[in-house]
Amino acid sequence: MCGICGELRFDGELPNLTRLTGMMDNLARRGPDDAGYYQEKQIALGHRRLAIIDLSSRAHQPMHDDSLGLTLVFNGTIYNYRQLRQELQKLGHIFQSDGDTEVILKSYAAWGEKCVTQLHGMFAFALWDSAKQQLLLARDRLGIKPLYYTKTKNYLRFASTLPALLKTGEIDKTLDPVALHHHLTLHAVVPAPRTIFQAIRKVSPATTLTISSEGQVAESHYWQLTACRPAQELSENQWIEATRERLKTTVDSHRLAADVPVGVLLSGGLDSSLLVGLLAQQQPENLLTFSIGFDDAPQEKGSEFEYSDQVIARYPTCHHRYHIKNSEVLTRLPEAIAAMSEPMVAQDAVAFYLLAEQVSQQAKVVQSGQGADEVFAGYFWYPLMHAATGSISERFSSYYFDRSHQEFLATVTPDFHGEDYTTDLITNLLTRAHADTFLDQVLRMDVTMLIVDDPVKRVDNMTMAWGLEARVPFLDHQLVEFAAMMPPELKLRTGGKYPLKAVARDILPHSVIDRPKGYFPVPALKYVRGEFLTFMQTVLNSTACRQRHLFQRDYVEKLLAAPEQFMTPLKGSKLWHLALLESWLQQFD
């Protein structure tokens, strides 16, 4: 719902307000409704507001409570803020506003750093405690809201986006070789706390950082996901009914936490269609829905209108349907790339950017189906991994890694060679305790790490670039905790997401439920040819690319000569992967 930034000095100097306002200006699109900053000696906090809850000036940020000695900047939504408010009032706290921001402030006053365990929602915030002379940075359990920072011996700076930090002009842009290995192996995922730049880090999901005025940092992880069967075994019908009730509760809580209308991004797939069906039952009038499509390619259709139209036929919503031509996709690529906090290669990043532009003219808040495939095992590679043999890392990497370690070494120049960092990371994550089976381990890792820095980050970046907040009910942490206890075999049935399909039987047309798994298609970025190939040739043959000396030229030329022959196991273009990374680096050099 907003953009936040700030600076804490450790050297006795005052924060540079020119740099602070530069970060705020860079975040303006995330929060077009209001702006403000607060400074107290060595701390300065900045905020750009997208007004969604308590639209009045009483919810202005930074929010300062002089009596408590606390100041807060916050991005996100707390879905249980009304319940917490009542609890805090019983403890004697008096509120001056009606929104969720002040609830965080008073929660910290009541419970200290443990207040994050009381918050049910998506959030990233920074809270200055003047009495303790310390700054608290916090991020929600699933990392839905981003928070980047850079720390030197003299200061710590933080912001909602990486480009906002770069606006301060004092960032070393040396590439992180470990992050580069992850990026080119894990479908552009660079797990927290790393980013592609060595000097910039991000707060990990479910984590708080407490920074003293002298620069000491204490890190605390306040939540972890377990994937074990419950003590009391449930029947199939009990699992399905429990899923139904939790979905209804979750979707409704995400709808009610707003003082503006909440719409739905309707792709035509099961997940977003199910959201429409559930919301239409609770809010039968004036539900806003939005669909987007692109030009077809010979191998793939560019839209799923045939399915989204069936949902709209059953639930006559206030529907908006957009078709984007390939020529516009190519023209708008540079600005979509500029909106990325980190380089993201998934083709639907551009789709979300162009869709959000249109949707933001009609709504401020939408629900999105992101996360359902990871939580309920909907992707095609899950059953393949489940049936595979070999070591844990082999069963995963064979179906997920974009390239092997040997191919990575052939992709980048020797300056960036090193160990097989990604296999080491994945092995460590998959062998952690409190997961009953291999697929439990995979799904837990996907939900708590891989999805955070791919689809979740993509949705946040591309929608907030237009002042549009996207909520992801399938990543509500209570729903995720429940689904993690479910037997993987139940999720995998009928090609995946069986519990969601069962819930949808009396809500959606069966043709939408039983259709083949679809994706947000932009075929021109998958089957590279014509003007799109020319664009990638120009980027990868540019002087900037050659002087960067990142990619081995023979590998680049091999991909340019036959782009459609080189696809990743997840069916992405390896050429687009390289071109996107280089384009992003050129944007911010």
Image: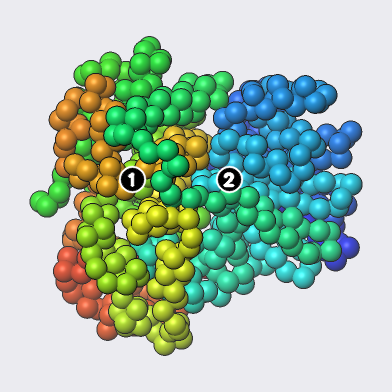
The kind of secondary structure element at disc 2 is: loop
Q: Is residue 308 visible?
A: yes
Q: Amino acid at mark 2?
A: Asp
Picture residue at 19% right of the left edge, 25% below the top: 509
Q: Can residue 311 be seen in this snapshot?
A: no
Query: How far across and down, in percent of the image, does residue 417 sit?
Result: 43, 84
| Mark whose residue sits in front, 1 or 2 | 1
- Quadrant of residue 8 within the rendered picture: bottom right
User: Which residue is rendered at x = 84% and y = 63% of the image?
Assistant: 214
Quadrant position of residue 52: top right
**Is 505 located above or below residue 586 in the figure?**
above
> How many numbered discs?
2
Please state the horizontal and vertical placement of residue 503, each as a whole percent of the image.
29, 28
Q: Is residue 329 above or below residue 275?
A: below
Identify the mark at residue 487; answer none if there is no mark. 1
The residue identified by callout 2 is 140
Q: From the viewer's perspective, is residue 402 above or below residue 251?
A: below
